[in-house]
Image: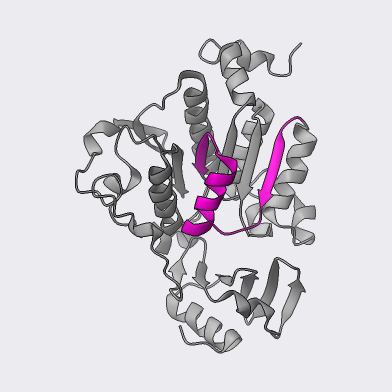
Amino acid sequence: MSRYDRQIKASQFGEQGQDNLSKSKFLIIGAGALGSTISEILARSGAGEIIICDMDIVSLSNLHRQSLYDETDVHQYELKVDAVKRHLSRINKEVKVTPIPEEITSDNLKQLLEKFQPKIVIDGTDNFNTRYVINDICHQFRIPWIYGACLGSKGTVYAIDYSVACLRCLLPDPPDTGENCSIEGILPQTAHLTASLQVSEVMKYIAQGRFSNHFITFDSFNMNFKSTEATFFYNNNCKTCGTHDYPATMSDTHNVTKMCYGKYSIKLPSNIFHKKIPNTVKSTSLFKIIKADHATVHLLKDGRIIIYDVYSKAEAKSIISSLFTISV
């Protein structure tokens, strides 16, 4: 009996869908609650190749909702993308998994799309700045992508192939969820349901060559689901699909950015990585982990810095200034 017998028997998918899936590459951006779950489902389903990008390490607070990881990953300070590759190889050795230990920027996303030419890009990030980069670059390359976000008990999924409105048409400016997610938290079933709906859009596209073209929102606690036809959201003045200005592709260094779950990030010159920094608890060729009072700082090889357990931009700036003697 075929490993994929049960999904092949599903009339919506069938033999052709399985064949298409086995020949397809998927670029997953982010290896957190969404990205790790999406990668696991696609690996179990028999995807051809999974390329997964993230520069974060597995932490104890991840484990309640990121079911691919375990306590061993936490104790080893393992990069999420390396843990994903190791776990998925045990689940399905036929699927090629390519870990990319990088934070996504407009420059490296272009390089990844040119190199791997994925069938679909899938959003597993935790901040809208990166999502706008994905939106703008994927529009330039005409590659479909699937947006997913969740907070508390609420989730949103929207698959974009540019026959309908793009993300910027719906959300010209980022919503203010970044200031609240570390306070409101996230229920594990919300993350898993969001990821499953994203994979549902993948399967539909692989089998039928199109997405649902619906903007999906839900509340997993109150069992409320809403699906809205996306055609109505198209905006002729959209800076992505209307005027083609692509504002997210403009590099913005030395700008402290709010992420989710008490995280801030900033991009500094790459030579900052070679500085000797006190209180460094782990150092590899790719990243350094630094303790700064109550906060933890990850310094990446490209000069990108992620500060954990801080809850204001002023606090993040103060930590950066004291560690790296630079004004931000």
Color theme of the render: one colour
Is residue 270 or residue 233 the one in the foreground? 270
Residue 104 falls within the magenta-colored stretch: yes
Q: Tell me if I can see residue 206 in this picture.
A: yes
Which quadrant of the view contains residue 94?
top right
Q: Is residue 81 magenta?
A: no
Residue 5 spot, x, y in % from top left: 68, 13
* Residue 30 coordinates in the image, percent (x, y): 57, 50
Task: Please tell me which residue is depicted at 30% across the width and 57% down the height of the picture.
Answer: 173
| Range shown magenta | 94-122
User: Looking at the picture, how far across and down is residue 83, in whole percent?
Assistant: 73, 49
Give the residue at x 29% y 55%. 245
With 150 as the anchor, is 23 left or right in this view?
A: right
Quarter of the picture containing the N terminus is top right
- Above or below 289: residue 24: above
Quadrant of the image occupied by residue 325: bottom right
Up-down relation of residue 231 to residue 62 (above or below): above
The answer to whether residue 105 shows anywhere in this view is no
Percent of width and height locating residue 111 = 54, 52
